[in-house]
Amino acid sequence: MSFAEEDQRDFTRSIKRWLNMVISETKTVYPSFKQVIKEIFTDGDSSLMGEETELEYEIGRKINENTPLYTAEEMDMPGLHLKAP
């Protein structure tokens, strides 16, 4: 294995580790963020909460809530496969 290939693997491992942190943080913070945004959009008016589907679409996120983390085995694999369920 050449020096460049070794660096490449370390680089993709760092990206995967960062993605795992982003996915974990999203799963932790998003539910409370979504609730706060709903309250802002509806100004606390419960009669507007019937617009739930449209509101869910507007508050959507880029990382699906079912996106799995990279496993230890996947972390050691070369290359970067973006995970999406």
Image (spheres, helix red, strand yellow):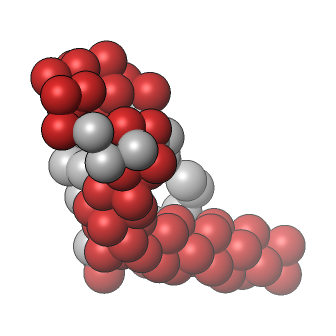
Q: Position of residue 23 (x, y in %)?
A: 40, 65
Where does the C terminus fall, quadrant-wise?
top left
Query: Does residue 80 lie above or below 19 as drawn?
Result: above
Q: Can residue 51 be seen in this view?
A: yes
As drawn, 66 above or below 17: above
- Percent across and percent down for residue 79 are 57, 55
- Quadrant of the image containing the N terminus: bottom right
Taking depth in this image into account, of 8 and 59 the one nearest to the observer is: 59
Quarter of the image holding residue 43?
top left
Report if residue 63 is visible in the image: no
Q: Is residue 85 above or below residue 4?
A: above
- At horizontal 62% and vertical 69% (from top left) the residue drawn is 15
Check the image and report above or below for 53 versus 4: above
Identify the residue at horizontal 63%, vertical 79% (top origin). Answer: 14
56 with respect to 6 (left or right): left
Residue sitting at 27 percent across and 39 percent down?
Answer: 45
Q: How many marks?
A: 0
Which residue is farthest right? Answer: 4
The residue positioned 39% from the left and 59% from the top of the image is 36
Location of residue 44 in the rendering, given as x and y in whole percent from the top left corner: 31, 48
Q: In terms of depth relative to the viewer, which is nearer, 1 or 61?
A: 61
Q: Is residue 34 left or right of residue 65?
A: right
Q: Nearer the viewer, residue 18 or 80?
A: 18
Please state the horizontal and vertical placement of residue 17, each as a whole percent of the image: 51, 78
